Amino acid sequence: MGIEMDKRKYKIILIEKLLGSIPKDLKVFTRYVQAKYYGKEEDLMDADPEQLDEQEMQMQIEQKLAPEGQGETGFYTDADGVYLMDYHIKGFLKEAGNVLKDILKIKNLRSKIDNYVFVFPRYIWLKEKPDGRLERSLRANTPQGPRVSLISSDFIDPVEFEIEIALLPHKELNWKVIETLLDYGKLKGLGQWRNGGYGRFTWERVK
């Protein structure tokens, strides 16, 4: 007996440049994993590292430690081009759920999205190669005092891509909720420097 899941396809339409969020310095990943298990850099985290699942661990690597090292971020790439992972979309839905939980009047919405909502495909190809690089300065307060770093990110110009969202039966989660979360993408989207308005998107249902 299989698990019954309701599925819908959506077209994601970027309306701003999307900045890559993957650190190009592989040492960043090593430093993060060491910090997770030995507790050396918890101050860089938004959440308790012991409570992070693997998707959140990856998102923390990209969002918090990318500005370290050479300060260069890009996209996952292979022979077919640059792509996002499914967890980028699910991470967006969880972030939107955390922000909108009181408006939607659903307790622990982020956790429910984590357990009942799934995104496909695993690899979401965008285009053959990035369209350019964006440089910006980042100011942060550190134990050694204020620090200004130059951050450089690959970007792609607005494109469209399709995803499929699968929903396990749940009395509080339905497509109206999911589509309200997707609406949040017009305000805060995907990728690096989302707070700066990059990666914003709209959506359409694909029938």
Image (cartoon, rainbow, N blue to C red):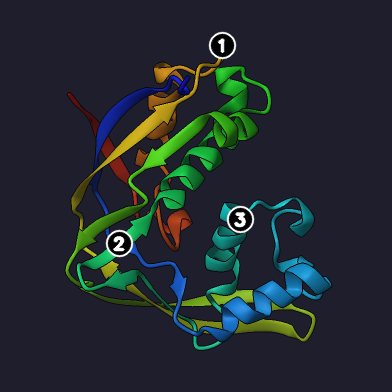
**Which kind of residue does numbered mark 2 sit on?**
Tyr
Secondary structure state at the residue bearing disc 3: helix
Q: Residue at x 72, y 53 (%)?
A: 47
Alpha-carbon span between mark 3 and mark 2: 19 Å
Where residue 175 sits: x, y (%)? 40, 19
Left or right side of 34 for 158: left
**Which kind of residue does numbered mark 3 sit on?**
Glu
Where residue 34 sits: x, y (%)? 73, 77
Secondary structure state at the residue bearing disc 1: loop
**Which kind of residue does numbered mark 1 sit on?**
Lys
Where residue 55 sits: x, y (%)? 56, 53
| Label 3 sits on residue | 54
The tag earlier along the polypeptide, 3 or 2, is 3
Q: Quadrant of the C terminus?
A: top left
- Please rate how many residues cluster around mark 1, counting C-alpha atoms within 10 Å: few if below 14, some from 14 to 19, many from 20: few
- Please rate how many residues cluster around mark 2, counting C-alpha atoms within 10 Å: few if below 14, some from 14 to 19, many from 20: some
- Please rate how many residues cluster around mark 3, counting C-alpha atoms within 10 Å: few if below 14, some from 14 to 19, many from 20: few
Q: Are marks 2 and 1 in contact (CB under 8 Å)?
A: no
Residue 165 vertical position relative to residue 33 in the rendered view, above or below: above
- Tell which residue pokes out farthest to the right in this image: 39
Q: Kindly identify which numbered label has been placed on residue 83.
A: 2
